[in-house]
């Protein structure tokens, strides 16, 4: 079941990449002139990359730094009563559109980087907490029983048994989170936080499809590259004994 | 020694374990036997404090477990569960070395110990670098036992450890474990719902029902004198047949015909005397014994009945089915039935006739055991 969930998540980005590629190929086939035009956005993209990476890096980094400990905390037996209500709140929170969250945080924090980071952090937090929690709760009970019965401390059990065995699920959550984060980051442009969104929204307003496409393609490429990097990291961090079982 | 003193465990108003008191002497394997839900696993898990007790005391080698740090307590008690619970993220060696590492053993000592244990459990040391997912069920179960033995704990808790192995492998691993236990003499609490497993492995068996201890006895005593109808039905309607496996030929040998008549059964005795002896003893088949006491062959009544002449040697045949004193009675009864005999001769290691196993002898031995009311300690 775990393997199936993992495959589902792997299939998501790959499918998305395929669809985007197909759409772009179709668009370029209809308007071959766009190819040359796209190339002129090189300097703009270079200038915007740092801002976009800053948005993504800080918000995703914060989400990982807070989401992992929160997921671990919620999975502890002492937090059993707290865990389900908190997960419910997070689930409901995830149904609020990122655009709405952005508007809300802007009304509190004004415009600029800070409300954008808050919004992206919130959008990214849920998959990390949910998968960390579910991954740790999904470690088979006999493993926990054996670990306790052999005299592991709670911290030792977490480090040596629970986290390694939950690693594939936790990593799947990280990948989803980071992909969601990069995809949502262009919205930050709406409240003046910069990034590839500047090209996309300027393109929409000026009715300039090539400008829009340049921003969108850069965003998609970043999402895919990051996901690929995380996938490699996931393979490297999954204990060998678990990969055997999955195969 | 593990001592249970009025131990109870309540979940709300229901008692999972109710007022259980008994002792497991050092070096003995005590099977907690009963149907599922009878509280046997709960009782076992209270020893290493995985389940907190509601009342009562459990002493391990004289120390109250409640006075000990649970983590330290568990590190000196081996623990094996039915699902094995090998850590899939660790190699076999890492799994075995979990407790030695927790106890702060040096890497060299841990490695050395892991190799010793592979040897002890007849596992290929090449498996040390493998992962649990690469092992067969039987191998995993052996590694589970090796892991529990890693720090050489004096006490083992085993919860249906061989329950998940297929029947053929289970029998083999049970025999291996029995041989291992005879060497290591650990104090073991072994949870099982399988009466055959209990009779094979247990030096005593504690039968539980609905949280209460019904009877704690040696396997022999349990089969011979079940405390009540529940124990009797749990050990099975065929408990007499099970009992045969626990008794040896030496327990039931009868010297029939009487030893002083043996002279008539020497090879050089007149066959007429031998035939008369057989008629008188009501036996159709007797062993011919030479003057040094060795079994020389057998004489069948039908071949000497009507006016046979000469000596016994002239009519003697090769020795038929025989058993040795160490054989179990099930084996003896089986040879008796298969050979169509009314008695099976028992020949000892030196080739001498030790006596006969007869149906009457078996019945007498079973009856003597059933009637005996000795305290457990005297057995």
Image (tube, coloured by chain):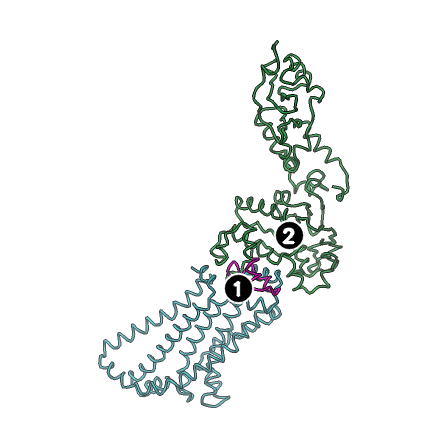
Instruction: Establish if A189 lies above or below B295.
Output: below
Q: Residues within 10 Å of mark 1 (few under 14, many from 20)?
A: some
Give left or right: position of A230 versus B379: left
Location of residue B250 in the rendering, given as x and y in whole percent from the top left corner: 67, 32
Q: Specify the quadrant of the image occupied by residue B316.
A: top right
Q: Which chain is green?
A: B
Task: Point out the image quarter for the C terminus of chain B.
Answer: top right
Q: Are dots 2 and 1 on a single chain?
A: no
- Residue annotated with mark 2: B37
Q: Name the tint of chain A in the rendering.
A: cyan
Q: In which chain is the residue bearing label 2?
A: B
- Foreground residue, A26 or A36? A36
Would you say A213 lies left or right of B212 here?
left
Where residue B165 appears, as percent x and y from the top left, is 53, 49
Q: Which residues are magenta?
A: B89-113
Residue B259: x and y in percent read 71, 22
Check disc 1 and report its element: helix, strand or loop: loop
Q: Main secondary structure of the magenta part?
A: helix
Whether residue B83 is visible here, answered yes or no, is: no
Q: Nearer the viewer, residue B60 or B209?
A: B60
Give the quarter of the image for residue A99: bottom left
Total tally of numbered discs in the picture:
2
Q: Which residue is mark 1?
A: A138
Residue density around tag 2, few if under 14, some if 14–19, many if 20 or more, within 10 Å: few
Q: Nearer the viewer, residue B89 or B53?
A: B89
Chain hosting mark 1: A
Judge whether residue B192 is colored magenta: no
Label drawn at residue A62 = none
A236 vs B121, left or right, is left
The answer to whether one can see residue B194 in this image is: yes
Q: CA distance from mark 2 to mark 1?
A: 25 Å
């Amino acid at each position: 079941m775990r393997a199936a969930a993992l495959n589902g998540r792997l299939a998501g980005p790959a499918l998305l990449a395929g669809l985007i590629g197909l759409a772009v190929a179709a668009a370029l086939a209809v308007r071959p002139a766009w190819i040359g035009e796209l190339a002129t956005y090189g300097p703009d993209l270079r200038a915007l990359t740092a801002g976009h990476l800053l948005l993504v890096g800080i918000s995703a980094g914060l989400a990982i730094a807070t989401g992992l400990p929160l997921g671990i905390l919620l999975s502890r037996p002492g937090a059993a009563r707290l865990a389900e209500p908190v997960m419910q709140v997070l689930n409901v929170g995830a149904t609020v559109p990122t655009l709405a969250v952005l508007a809300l945080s802007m009304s509190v924090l004004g415009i600029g980087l800070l409300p954008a980071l808050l919004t992206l952090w919130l959008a990214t937090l849920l998959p990390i907490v949910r998968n960390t929690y579910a991954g740790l709760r999904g470690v088979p009970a006999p493993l926990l029983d054996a670990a306790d019965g052999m005299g592991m401390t709670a911290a030792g059990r977490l480090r040596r048994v629970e986290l390694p065995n939950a690693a594939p699920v936790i990593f799947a959550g990280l990948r989803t989170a980071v992909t969601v984060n990069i995809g949502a980051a262009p919205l930050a442009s709406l409240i003046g936080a910069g990034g590839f969104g500047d090209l996309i929204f300027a393109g929409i307003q000026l009715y300039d499809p090539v400008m829009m496409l340049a921003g969108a393609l850069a965003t998609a490429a970043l999402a895919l590259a990051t996901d690929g990097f995380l996938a490699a990291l996931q393979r490297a961090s999954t204990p060998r004994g678990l990969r055997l079982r999955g195969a | 020694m593990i001592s249970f003193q009025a131990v109870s465990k309540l979940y709300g108003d229901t008692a999972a374990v109710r007022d259980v008191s008994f002792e497991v002497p050092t070096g003995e394997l005590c099977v907690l036997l009963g149907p599922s839900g009878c509280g046997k696993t709960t009782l076992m898990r209270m020893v290493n404090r995985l389940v907190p007790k509601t009342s009562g005391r459990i002493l391990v080698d004289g120390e109250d477990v409640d006075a000990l740090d649970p983590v330290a307590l568990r590190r000196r008690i081996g623990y094996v569960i039915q699902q094995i619970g090998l850590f899939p993220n660790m190699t076999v060696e890492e799994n075995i070395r979990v407790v030695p590492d927790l106890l702060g053993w040096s890497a060299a000592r841990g490695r050395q110990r892991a190799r010793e244990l592979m040897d002890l459990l007849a596992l290929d040391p090449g498996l040390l670098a493998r992962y649990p997912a690469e092992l067969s069920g039987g191998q995993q179960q052996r590694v589970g036992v090796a892991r529990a033995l890693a720090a050489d704990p004096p006490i083992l808790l085993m919860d249906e450890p061989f329950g998940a192995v297929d029947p053929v492998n289970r029998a083999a691993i049970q025999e291996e474990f029995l041989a291992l236990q005879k060497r290591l003499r650990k104090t073991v609490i072994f949870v099982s719902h399988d009466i055959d497993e209990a009779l094979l492995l247990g030096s005593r068996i504690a039968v539980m029902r609905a949280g209460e201890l019904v009877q704690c006895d040696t396997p022999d005593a349990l089969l011979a004198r079940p405390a009540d109808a529940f124990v009797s039905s749990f050990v099975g309607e065929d408990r007499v047949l099970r009992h045969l496996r626990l008794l040896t030929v030496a327990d039931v040998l009868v010297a029939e015909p009487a030893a002083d008549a043996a002279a008539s059964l020497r090879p050089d005795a007149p066959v007429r005397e031998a035939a008369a002896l057989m008629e008188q003893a009501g036996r159709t088949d007797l062993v011919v014994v030479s003057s040094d006491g060795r079994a020389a062959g057998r004489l069948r009544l039908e071949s000497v009945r009507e006016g046979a002449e000469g000596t016994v040697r002239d009519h003697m045949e090769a020795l038929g089915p025989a058993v040795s004193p160490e054989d179990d009675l099930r084996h003896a009864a089986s040879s008796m039935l298969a050979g169509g005999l009314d008695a099976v001769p028992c020949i000892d290691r030196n080739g001498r006739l030790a006596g006969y196993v007869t149906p009457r002898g078996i019945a007498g031995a079973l009856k003597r055991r059933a009637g005996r009311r000795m305290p457990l300690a005297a057995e």
